[in-house]
Amino acid sequence: MELDQTSHFTNLYTLVGCLTKAIDLVSPEMSGHHRQVAYLSHKIAEALDVSFETDRSLIVAALIHDVGAIDSDESEPFRRLEQGNNLDQHARLDGKGYPFKLDARNLSMGSRIMAVADIFSAITEDRPYRKGMPKQKAIAVLNDLAKNDGISPYICLILFKNYDDVACKRKNASEKAVSNFETWQCH
């Protein structure tokens, strides 16, 4: 059974890889963000000892969580794909997230994980218009969001316990993603 699951996810990753390249082409300044969110989600899920299927589904959902950024007249199918992954990828415990506006009672563990991973990635990665936040400021922002029912304090705690390891590996993965993008874009 696990071999069949591995094969299924390998095929799915190939398709998702095409979508992530499209996102990179539309938003080169965000190149690699979705990969960082996928990596962070995976590492948090690993620390929580989730099932193989849950982990792989979370990775796929994280990779396409910003597919709605492909904004064109033909982008409606992409927005539907983004919403159809059954994770409230920009979730908030208070129900103010999107696309589904689910509150804490209705949010899956995967949605909680991805919300923390997405915010952490967004505030700590460098963008063309600003530098990423240093560790202490990022922790303060995440703590404030957790205290105000924005994100899961438990998931934040898992991230904080693994912060240095995750941040270092994420940075390396990000640099590799940007390099791969630049190589791919030139061909």
Image: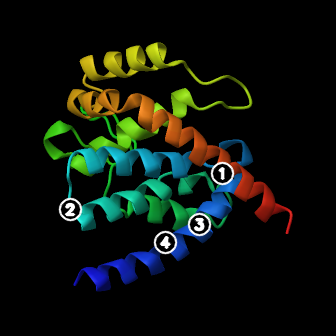
Residue 186 at x, y = what percent? 86, 63
Picture layout, residue 131 above or below residue 77: above
Q: Which of disc 2 and disc 3 is earlier in sequence? A: 3
Q: Which residue is mark 2?
A: 51
Q: Which of disc 2 and disc 1 is earlier in sequence? A: 2
Q: Disc 3 or disc 1, which is closer to the eye? A: 1
Q: CA distance from mark 4 to mark 1?
A: 18 Å
Q: Which of disc 3 and disc 4 is earlier in sequence? A: 4
Along the line of sight, the residue nearer the viewer: 61 or 172: 172
Q: Residues within 10 Å of mark 1 (few under 14, many from 20)?
A: few
Q: Which residue is mark 3?
A: 19
Residue type for callout 3: Leu
Q: Residues within 10 Å of mark 4 (few under 14, many from 20)?
A: some
As helix, strand or loop, the secondary structure at mark 4 comes to helix
Quarter the C terminus occupies: bottom right
Q: Which of disc 1 and disc 3 is earlier in sequence? A: 3
As helix, strand or loop, the secondary structure at mark 2 comes to loop
Q: Which of disc 1 and disc 4 is earlier in sequence? A: 4
Q: Is residue 187 visible?
A: yes
Residue type for callout 1: Lys
Q: Determine whether, in the image, residue 46 is placed left or right of residue 179.
A: left
Q: Which residue is mark 4?
A: 13
Residue depicted at 30% across the width and 59% down the height: 55
Q: CA distance from mark 3 to mark 1?
A: 18 Å
Q: CA distance from mark 4 to mark 3?
A: 10 Å
Q: Disc 4 or disc 1, which is closer to the eye? A: 1
Along the line of sight, the residue nearer the viewer: 169 or 128: 169
Q: Which residue is mark 1?
A: 176
